[in-house]
Amino acid sequence: MVISSSPIRPGRSPAREPGGRCSGGRRGGASLSTIVVISVVLATSYGGYLWWNTRKDISTNGDVVLYTVARDDFLLSVTERGEVESAGVTEIRSEVKTKNSPGLAILRVVPEGTAVEAGDFLVELDSSALVEEKITQQITVNTVEALVIEARNIYETAVITKREYIEGTYVQERQTIESEVFVAEENLNRAKEYHEYSKKLASKGYVNKLQLKADKFSVEKSVKELDAARTKLKVLDKFTKEKMVKQCESDVKISKAKWKAQKSSLELEITKLREIEDQISKSTITAPKSGTVVYAHESDQRGQDDFIVEEGAMVRERQAIIHLPDASAMRVVVKVNESLIQFVKPGMPATISPVGIDGQPLDGTVESVNQYAEPTGWRKANVKEYKAFVRINEPVSGLRSGMTAAVTIRCEFVADAIKIPVQTVYAHGDDYYCLVVDDGNWEARVVECGPTNDRFFVINDGLRETEQVAMAPRKYLDRVNLPELPPEENQRAVRGPRLPEKKEPATRAKTAHLAAPASATSGS
């Protein structure tokens, strides 16, 4: 059973009389007295309930209060308050890159609570800087495009130049040299014929020696001219042609590489332009699905507002702006204290009672439990809590995100178990004892404890039905003999509990009564 008192809502401050004294002082004193009386009555009622619930098993033997061991159903449950949220929330985030700026300002935003359909307007971010950047980038694209055209023309000219030389200039030069060789050969033949004819005339005395010598020189000159023409042809075929082809091929490759580089630069600049245009389009955010608009406000660890969704607010890159919850899949997020988190496992059934909705409690199932504790502030530095997510199996109409709900998780149920009050168990060293009383005889018996809550222990071994054990056994330790403990154990103010064994999950709850939480409830 959980006893909780709701906080008293502050009312109007009492009017002050002249002199600074509150006129409602007498009323405030009466209210404080009323609160004290109500608290005492509630505590007394709770104690009476516990006594009434177990009185059939409690008897007295002189000044000793005994409890009769019996079998009954055992239920270990954890009750916490949490917040209802949608399990299928669609987050609307800013996808605009902020680069070196702190963020983009919100120009327009749809009012919170508006029901939207897919494609409806949600948020418009300030894109003026992106528009200016687009104009600059468009100029850059045009400049690089002109360079690409120029590089392409140079490449095509180099290709034509190579073809022109191989198929035109080289052929023309070779034909010219071949003509020179042909003329030189003809001149040589004529010179040889004149020389032979001059030799015959000289033998008959018609030509003098000087004329004969001149004809011989003409032959030698024609031979030299023929050799020069042939060498020129050889140089053209073996060296000049190869050199010019290599040069033309080099010009083609260089111009092609420059053209390719300019094309790559153009593609890069066009990609940048497309990205800027895409960023401008993303400055206007529309709904990807139907839902109800919920602003994604952010708070710091002290609970103060860190980000408020409103016109003029600065939005960082990838920051959530709006949530679109799915009302068909709802869950409750609860924070479980570290002393109870060991009992909560995925798949456990739960009962959910939302505040503000009348009717039967809702059925739920534990979906998951976080492995790491939630961040804590300076006020709760030593309190560790873990989030658990409880799915609502069948959501009802009127259930909204942000509602408060009480969640009772049924952690463990043992049917027809031997259970005893936690007040009857005494920890001594690494063992747990019960003081069994039988016709005035006292026995300190070691018991094996199973699951526990804030009221009962399940006893796996060590006790039988109808046996009687002493309540508050610490008062009667002088009537039994307990084993001696080492000095270091005696020096402890509170003895440390034995760690639970993994092979027996039921024994994990042996020592939970050492710090029995007020939020753990039991049913018998």
Image (cartoon, grey):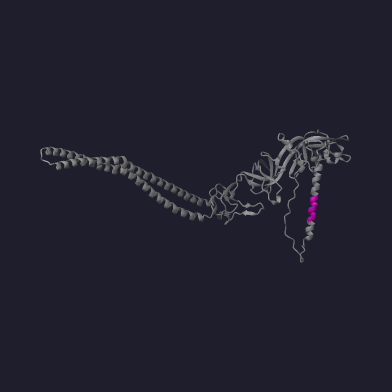
Residue 265 visible in the snapshot: yes
Residue 91 position, x and y percent, is: 58, 48
Tally of marks: 0
In the picture as drawn, the residue positioned furthest to the bottom comes out as 18
Against 8, is 428 above or below? above
- The front one of 55 and 262 is 262
Residue 347 located within the stretch drawn in magenta: no
Main structural element of the magenta stretch: helix, strand or loop? helix
Residue 37 located within the stretch drawn in magenta: yes
Residue 304 position, x and y percent, is: 65, 54
* Magenta-tinted stretch: 32-40
In the picture as drawn, the residue positioned furthest to the front comes out as 209
Q: Quadrant of the N terminus?
A: top right
Q: Is residue 13 left or right of residue 62?
A: left
- The front one of 340 and 234 is 234
- The front one of 448 and 31 is 448
Q: Is residue 392 left or right of residue 126?
A: right
Residue 410 position, x and y percent, is: 71, 40
**Rendering quarter of residue 65:** top right
Q: Is residue 230 left or right of residue 474?
A: left
Residue 179 visible in the snapshot: no
Q: Quadrant of the C terminus?
A: top right
Residue 187 position, x and y percent, is: 19, 41
